[in-house]
Amino acid sequence: MAMKVYKPTSAGRRGMKRVSRKELSKPSVDRLLRPLKKHAGRSGGKISVRHRGGGAKRKYRLVDFKRHKVNISAEVMALEYDPNRTAYIALIEYEDGEMAYILASQHMKKGDKIISGDKIELKPGHRLPLSKIPVGSLVYNIELKIGQGGRMARSAGTAAQVLACENGYVHLKLPSTEVRKVREECLATLGQVSNPPHRFINLGKAGISRHLGRRPTVRGSAMATVDHPHGGGEGRTGIGLKHPKTKWGRPAYGVKTRRKKKPSGKLILKRRRTKR
């Protein structure tokens, strides 16, 4: 997919970049769409997650993250845009006539044939157990538990790498640089998720963020003392604290939030690198 660069006809257009969607089709199967009710970060009517609300009306696409129809070939009928995720989705039709949406892999195009199974060709878009995938291969839409459906490496342009296979587990290097063990019976799709240029998008203006349901974020240091621990002072002053805090006085920035005794912690071989 190529990037579409807009001419600077206004301040909002200056620097705006988006991914061209010329090769994508419009939704054509209504039974795979569902109405999506907005909750906008609220619980019981009260804001529980800030900076969310509004946004354009959208429908949810029923994406099949499991792909458990074994040894039944399917044809890619169309590639479509999904407003609920950064990756593109593919409309496929199985040999028995059933239709479904799946996560599209990079370079997937209309007319391609894909299949799931344990004794199939190693080809991008095919889904098979991790034990059947060679070391060094890139995979996405990976199951965490057997039969659960894909949970990891699902956003645009991401992929995990198979590092090793031993004692019933496969070692995966995730997009976050974390290395963890996953049962070798878990399914994964070969290849890389579609739409890798997504990370180069420049929205250009605040209005597009509002269309996406993102409300403005105000810095704590720009607030008054009563509204935030970082607030107050004349001009641009420092936070005046040993460590940064949230609006409610709890530690922020770089604080570990994962439970130390979480059961899945023993499956993590190497923690992800923190950004400096």
Image (tube, helix red, strand yellow):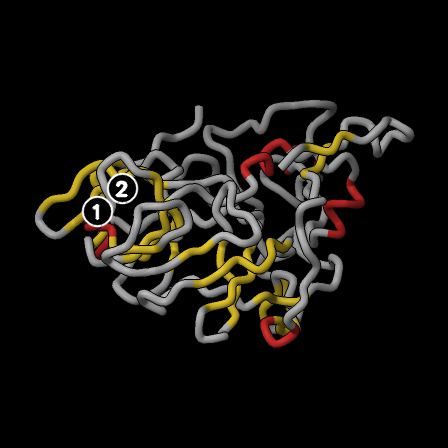
Under tag 2, what secondary structure? strand
44 over 188 or under it: above or below: below
- Which residue has dot 2 on it? 172
Q: Position of residue 77 (x, y in %)?
A: 57, 60
Under tag 1, what secondary structure? strand
Question: Relative to 193, is 129 on the left or the right?
Answer: left
- Which residue has dot 1 on it? 181
> Which of these two is toward me, 40 or 235?
40
Q: Residue at x 18, y 38 (%)?
A: 164
* Mark with earlier residue (2, 1): 2
Residue positioned most to the left:
167
Gap between marks 2 and 1, in whole Å? 6 Å
Q: Amino acid at mark 2?
A: Leu
Q: Residue at x 55, y 48 (%)?
A: 109
114 over 236 or under it: above or below: below
Among the 4 quarters of the image, the one containing residue 171: top left
Q: Amino acid at mark 1?
A: Lys
Tag on residue 243?
none
Among the 4 quarters of the image, the one containing residue 216: top right
Crowding around mark 1 (Cα neighbors within 10 Å: few <14, some 14 to 19, many 20+) is many
Q: Considering the image in quadrants, where does the N terminus appear? A: top right
> Which of these two is toward me, 75 or 23?
75
Question: Relative to 39, is 161 on the left or the right?
Answer: left
Q: Position of residue 36 (x, y in %)?
A: 64, 70
Q: Position of residue 252 (x, y in %)?
A: 48, 39
Q: Residue at x 25, y 46 (%)?
A: 133
> Which of these two is toward me, 172 or 93?
93
Q: Are marks 2 and 1 in contact (CB under 8 Å)?
A: yes
Q: Position of residue 251 (x, y in %)?
A: 45, 41
